[in-house]
Image (cartoon, rainbow, N blue to C red):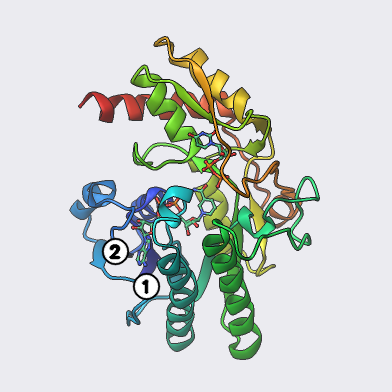
Amino acid sequence: MPTLVTGGAGFLGSHLCERLVKQGEEVICLDNFFTGRRSNVSHLLDYRNFEILRHDVVDPFKVEVNRIYNLACPASPIHYQYNPIKTVKTSVMGAINCLGLAKRVGATILQASTSEIYGDPEVHPQPESYRGNVNPIGLRSCYDEGKRCAETLFFDYYRENQVDIRVIRIFNTYGPQMTPDDGRVVSNFIVQAIKGENLTLYGDGSQTRSFCYVDDMIDGMMGIMEQDESVGPVNLGNPNEFTIRQLAEAVLQKVDTGSKIVEESLPADDPTQRKPDIGLARKLMDWEPKVQLTEGLDRTIPYFRDIIQS
Ligand code: NAD
Ligand code: UDP
């Protein structure tokens, strides 16, 4: 029976589809191509065990599958704030449609939730038990509250209908296959440095994030799907924490085209700190991020160089 990956043409989804296809699974990639691109997965069309379905998760759908990875949702602030009502619909109605499908066909279903569940956290690092500090009416709420409601739905379907769920909370992940106009910080800084443009540091750059390389994230995601000790939520991310200024400096050390760092205004509700407590993920599947920031940047920069130069 196939595996369904919603949002499968996006950054994480395309890596996941590739891994599943190459290990011989039948994969259905469902996407509305809002932020995803056909070119992220077009190389997989040569495989007989891969197919693409253009569809919006807001509308119900039926497929016979035994695993569902629900990744459909724009993840970059500029994209999820572009049409905030649609973002809420994608998270909430998308979750209802995917959970309804999982219930009907008896599939195990994994939700790609987010560290944004914790908002601007007052507990540091963040364990799964922390309930968060989210502004319910701010610019980021469409994403944060949409994802929080999706988690609620997952646990209600689990309690009421015994749907076999997994919930992961993903912390900032980067790597090849991000679009140059994605808008998230790692891709922005690398693209700006390659083009010799100034690096746009929002605020004074003292806010922190913990950056996970995509291969580690996909290992963690698939590991949680395949274990059955916990339904989650489980934090997945790299606990090494950096200020955003440190990230800008690290990129400039690797791409020296004379770019400077310029400070721009900090967006509203920008979290001041973020670092996952990954104790649960370690315990459940003996998982540990292997690729640290400097190596991850070395693997990501050539990808952006190639697409910018071509
Ligand atoms: P992305 O924007 O590259 O991918 C999202 C994909 O979902 C795209 O292919 C997009 O076209 C598709 N999509 C959006 N709305 C849809 C809809 N209504 N119907 C069908 N498809 C739709 O982002 P990503 O970084 O690959 O994120 C994937 C998932 O992981 C998202 O759910 C995101 O919230 C979650 N996540 C990612 C990160 C990260 O750092 N990358 C962090 C936390 C959570
Ligand atoms: N950021 C920045 N310059 C950019 C893009 C982002 O300084 O060009 C900052 C942003 O304000 C935030 C951090 O980098 O503090 C991470 O932003 P991103 O959008 O990647 O992810 P999120 O805020 O959702 O963690």
Q: Quadrant of ligand 2?
A: top right
Q: CA distance from mark 1 to mark 2?
A: 8 Å
Q: Is residue 187 left or right of residue 135?
A: left
Q: Is residue 127 left or right of residue 201?
A: right
Q: Badges 1 and 2: C-beta atoms under 8 Å apart? A: yes
Secondary structure, mark 1, is loop
Disc 1: CA contacts within 10 A as few (<14), some (14-19) or many (>=20): many
Tag of residue 16: none
Residue 113 in sight from this viewpoint: no
Write the residue at 24% across / 63% down: 51
The residue that disc 2 covers is: 32
Most foreground residue, 72 or 79: 79
Which quadrant is the N terminus positioned in?
A: bottom left
Give the x, y percent position of residue 19: 40, 50
Give the amino acid type for the residue marked by disc 2 in the picture: Asn
> Cβ(mark 2) to ligand 1 < 8 Å?
yes
Give the x, y percent position of residue 226: 56, 63
Give the x, y percent position of residue 112: 53, 61
Tag of residue 57: 1
Look at the picture and state if 226 lies above or below 293.
below
Write the residue at 34% across / 53% down: 35
> Cβ(mark 1) to ligand 1 < 8 Å?
yes
Looking at the image, is mark 1 or mark 2 earlier in the sequence?
2
Most foreground residue, 247 or 259: 259
Write the residue at 38% across / 68% down: 4
